[in-house]
Image: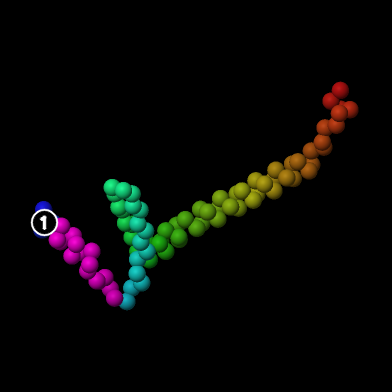
Amino acid sequence: MTQRKNTYRAALHRDPAEPGSSPARSTTLSTRFVRITIELEPDAARSLDRWTAPAISLLSHTRTTALDLLSAFTRATPAATADQQS
């Protein structure tokens, strides 16, 4: 068990394999009993952006089109007045 801890600690303090690469982004989530560190490599972040950007763009355009259609229908439909309802 002690050897495993020492190996883990040594791995945490190791230098990155590629000195010219940009550093990974890391986020630490910690509570009283648990600490989780998430590291995201720059290549993975670019790949994630490449896959999610078109989907977000599509959702944005769909929302804009739906709002345009809704506003066109409300302008085209005459408002009901009190005389017509009686």
Instruction: Say what amino acid the circle numbered 1 marks.
Output: Thr
Residue at (34% x, 69% y) in the render: 23
Could you say which quadrant of the image residue 51 lies in? bottom left
Could you say which quadrant of the image residue 16 lies in? bottom left
Q: Is residue 9 magenta?
A: yes
**Which stretch did the figure color magenta?**
5-19
Q: Which x, y percent locates residue 44?
A: 37, 61
* Residue under label 1: 2
Residue at (37% x, 64% y) in the render: 25
In the image: residue 26, left or right of residue 50: left
Q: Which x, y percent locates residue 67?
A: 67, 46
In the image: residue 48, left or right of residue 62: left
Q: Which x, y percent locates residue 42?
A: 38, 66
Q: Which x, y percent locates residue 20?
A: 32, 76
Q: From this viewpoint, is residue 13 visible?
A: yes
In the image: residue 32, left or right of residue 73: left
Within 10 Å of disc 1 (Cα), the crowding (few <14, some 14-19, many 20+) is few
Q: How is the image coloured?
A: rainbow
Residue at (51% x, 53% y) in the render: 55
- Does 56 sit above or below residue 78? below
Viewer-closest of 39 and 48: 39
Quadrant occupied by the C terminus: top right
Residue at (29% x, 76% y) in the render: 19
